[in-house]
Image (cartoon, rainbow, N blue to C red):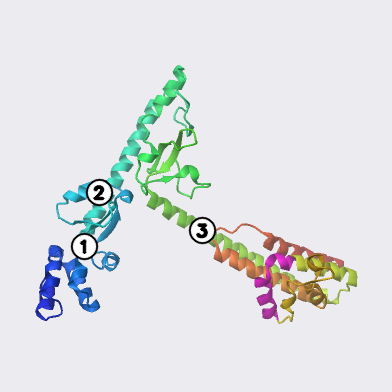
Amino acid sequence: PADVQSLIKEGKLTPSHGERLVRFADFPVVCSIIAERAVGNKTPAADLDGKNIPFEYELGNRGVIKRFYASSANFDTSVCKKCPFSAYRSGNYTDYGYCLKPEHFEQLEREATLAQQEALRAAQEATTRAAAEIEEAAAFGEIPASNGEPETAKKVAAIKHLPMIDSLRSGSYTDLSYKSSLPAGCTEGCPCRAAAIRNYKGEAPKVVPICSNPARFEKLQSADTRSNKKAARTAFAEREKAAQEVLELNPLIVDFYVSPAVHRQVVVAVWDSLRSAGKTAVEPAAKRLGIEIDFTLWDKRVDGGYAGRPSLWDALEKLPIPDLIRLTVEAHLGREILAKFGYSNPKPTDKLAAIDWIAEAGSEVVNER
């Protein structure tokens, strides 16, 4: 390219650099970027030798080359060695290669994916036709052994058109039999739904459902995740509102007399609840509420070592019931925020149960008044 020749004329690159770069002359963008980086990095000409493409990661990130492993491509990359554009470059490893015309590589991958989907659809249709005489002959599940019985033989013949799952290229399908649940939109009527025979070591051969369009499946899963998070946020807002209503009952609770024995029972219940929330949730909750507690006592016990009474009980016993309730609600709400927004699919835990318990306790106090 003219810009590379200018760099040589200006003395920024040597003629030796030019000799190494001439192998990229048919791909001017690639050649220019390598020359530009060689100038910026003061790269010796000798470092531009070898099978590897210089500055391959930057070139890949810019989208001007395609780095690939033959085993993970959607098509047989042996055709790349006869590339009509002479865009193939081998890597230092047997399975590794480069394509200097990435748009053509992506076209071949799309064509291979469509061809495989069509083959899977044809196999499914052939299986359905072959199974027409035998009800549920091609149903998902273990394949019966051919033991000479006519009915069994027909069932085995009904699925002979299906491909072995090991023959499908990695990344070109999703085995749905391992999914505990399928996202909305992934149904048996999907054009990308197909079947294959899985024959892994240690298990009987099985006909399993697969998706021949993993990219679409991932999009459906992402949409489901967003929907679940939205529902979780809505449920959390309702819980937060209910908890706030309980806290507004505090004036009534303050006036209600509680015996020392009952107060101790509340402390024990609150401690058990706070311990499940964890110190990392309780300590910031106490600071937000302005409740002073010596958290150095959290892991300490008195009267018998590990089996003795938690030292924090003494600190909790000094708090009135309204503060105990505030602290419990605040700690569990804080922990629920982490669960709801820190994980895509939180499991129900005692966080919600604790808030329900507090709401129920508050109602009992009102009824008692």
In what element is the residue under mark 3? Answer: helix
- Where in the figure is residue 118, as x and y percent of width and height? 31, 40
Q: Disc 3 to disc 1, how far (Cα)?
A: 51 Å
Point out the stretch of residues depicted in magenta. 273-289
Q: Which mark is residue 227?
A: 3
In what element is the residue under mark 1? Answer: loop
Q: Which mark is residue 77?
A: 2
Q: Which mark is residue 50?
A: 1
Q: Closer to the camera: disc 3 or disc 1?
A: 1
Q: Earlier in the sequence, mark 3 or mark 1?
A: 1
Instruction: Describe residue 317's horizontal placement relative to residue 206 as left or right.
Output: right
Q: Residues within 10 Å of mark 2 (few under 14, many from 20)?
A: many
Instruction: Describe residue 271's horizontal placement relative to residue 208 as left or right.
Output: right
Q: Residue 64 magenta-drawn?
A: no
Q: Earlier in the sequence, mark 1 or mark 2?
A: 1
Q: Disc 2 to disc 3, how far (Cα)?
A: 39 Å
Q: Which mark is residue 339?
A: none
Inspect the image, locate mark 1, and give the three-letter code of the amino acid beneath it: Gly
Which of the image's four quarters has the C terminus? bottom right
Residue 4 image-quadrant placement: bottom left
- Where in the figure is residue 32, as x and y percent of width and height? 17, 71
- Where in the figure is residue 359, as x and y percent of width and height? 75, 65
Give the residue displayed 14% in from the left and 72% down from the top. Answer: 17
Residue 369: in sight, yes or no?
no
Q: Closer to the camera: disc 2 or disc 3?
A: 2
